[in-house]
Image: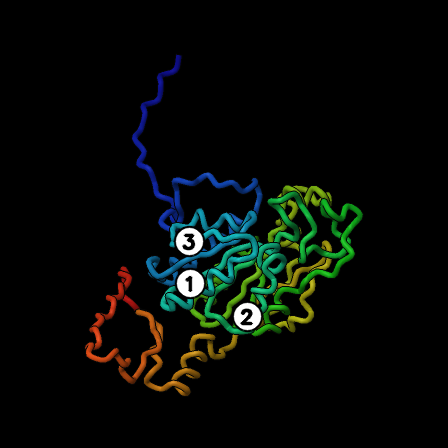
């Protein structure tokens, strides 16, 4: 018999993105070859290279496969009801303006169930980052037709092919007022990470669409093969065209996918416009929010009943969040 090899001690190595993930919840629930995990890795890398203080970052997700991201990121997170990720993120950003607020969800949640919230958040130019993983279908609930399902593509509710015109999401975001708009696939790892880094550093309503069709339902229903076949399709059919007119970015079934950064501009955010307006109208009565909070204060003291002195009330102490690298 051959001599048994001596056992060598190997130290456990920490995964590079483990500081950004709740490792006690790994392995995740996503199917093999699903692109969502790749998108999460790109976002974690972007956080690391952007030097974001994790105590000042939060993530909000809705319902669906992508909606589970909030449960895996080691950030202050909220898993909202279906279609309500953006309203919750809106309240969070207005109440805690110093935070980086990221909405991370799918096409059905953000522009199907939550479409009305999406367009108005872009119109108001709320200072939030919205990452939409587009899998062309309602993946978690059985493969139903979605507002992004390409024409002629099959779904469980349209087994003979879709005849409804899908959304052109970059055009929808830009026409509603988004200040940053980009699209990539789950194959474009480096470019997607760079796009996330850019979006994190910008202000206003930033929108990044990531194409990652469901390899379990969408691919099977349309006989597209495995996740590897999908990645090969992205490699052969993705066309990078920065600054392309967003009106020309429709996605047809098994046709080319135009990727790139299409919008990158500045305009006042909702909070900036609100502060400017109230400062002009109310003057010293207006106390701005960031970061401690604000309220309207009366300049004249309240009148008290006869014979009674007005009671003195102490202002409540406001807590300030501690950060690792200090407030910016």
Element under disc 2: helix
Q: Which residue is mark 3?
A: 77
- Counting from the top left corner in percent of width and height, residue 204 is at 48, 72
Element under disc 3: strand
Q: Residues within 10 Å of mark 2 (few under 14, many from 20)?
A: many
The percent position of residue 217, horizontal first and vertical second, equals 66, 43
In front of the other: 96 or 34: 96
Label annotation for residue 56: none
Q: Check contact, mark 2 vs mark 1: CB within 8 A.
A: no
Whether residue 227 is situated above or below residue 254 in the rendered picture: above
Label 2 vs label 1, nearer the camera: 1
Q: Is residue 318 left or right of residue 246?
A: left
Say above or below: 263 vs 84: below
Q: Which residue is mark 2?
A: 122
The correct choice, above or below, for 123 with respect to 196 in the image is below
Tell me if 316 is positioned left or right of 23 in this view. left
Q: Quadrant of residue 258?
A: bottom right
Instruction: Please report the residue visible at 41 percent of the width from the left and 87 percent of the height from the top.
Output: 280
- For residue 215, which quarter of the picture? top right
Q: Is residue 322 left or right of residue 125?
A: left
Where does the C terminus fall, quadrant-wise? bottom left
Quarter residue 107 falls in: bottom right
Question: Looking at the image, which residue is at 40% across and 48% down?
Answer: 21
**Mark 2–mark 1 distance (CA, rounded to whole Å):** 16 Å
In the image, residue 298 lies at what x, y percent?
31, 81
Of badges 3 and 1, nearer the viewer stands 1
Q: Is residue 93 above or below residue 298?
A: above
| Classed neighbour count for the residue bearing mark 1: other residues with Cα under 10 Å, few (<14), some (14–19), many (≥20) | some
The residue carrying mark 1 is 92
Distance, label 3 to label 2, CA atoms, is 22 Å
């Amino acid at each position: 018999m051959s001599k048994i090899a001596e056992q060598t001690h190997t130290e456990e190595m920490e995964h590079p993105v483990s500081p950004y993930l709740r490792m006690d919840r790994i392995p995740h629930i996503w199917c093999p070859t699903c692109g969502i995990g790749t998108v999460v890795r790109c976002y974690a890398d972007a956080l690391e290279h952007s030097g974001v203080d994790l105590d000042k970052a939060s993530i909000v997700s809705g319902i669906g496969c992508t909606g589970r991201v909030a449960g895996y990121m080691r950030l202050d997170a909220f898993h909202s009801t279906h279609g309500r990720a953006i309203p919750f993120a809106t309240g969070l950003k207005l109440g805690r303006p110093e935070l980086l607020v990221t909405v991370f969800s799918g096409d059905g949640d953000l522009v199907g169930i939550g479409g009305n919230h999406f367009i108005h958040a872009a119109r108001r130019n709320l200072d939030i980052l919205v990452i939409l993983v587009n899998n062309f279908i309602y993946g978690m609930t059985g493969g139903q037709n979605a507002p992004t399902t390409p024409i002629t593509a099959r779904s469980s509710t349209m087994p003979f092919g879709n005849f409804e015109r899908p959304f052109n999401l970059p055009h929808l975001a830009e026409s509603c007022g988004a200040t940053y708009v980009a699209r990539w696939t789950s194959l474009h790892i480096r470019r997607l990470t760079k796009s996330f880094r850019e979006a994190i550093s910008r202000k206003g309503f930033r929108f990044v669409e990531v194409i990652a069709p469901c390899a379990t339902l969408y691919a099977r229903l349309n006989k597209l093969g495995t996740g590897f076949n999908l990645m090969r399709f992205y490699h052969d059919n993705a066309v990078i065209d920065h600054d392309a007119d967003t009106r020309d970015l429709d996605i047809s079934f098994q046709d080319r996918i135009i990727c790139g950064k299409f919008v990158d501009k500045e305009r006042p955010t909702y909070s900036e416009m609100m502060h400017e307006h109230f400062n002009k109208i109310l003057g010293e009565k207006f106390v701005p929010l960031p970061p401690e909070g604000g309220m309207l204060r009366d300049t004249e003291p309240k009148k008290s009943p006869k014979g009674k002195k007005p009671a003195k009330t102490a202002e409540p102490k406001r807590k300030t969040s501690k950060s690792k690298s200090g407030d910016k």
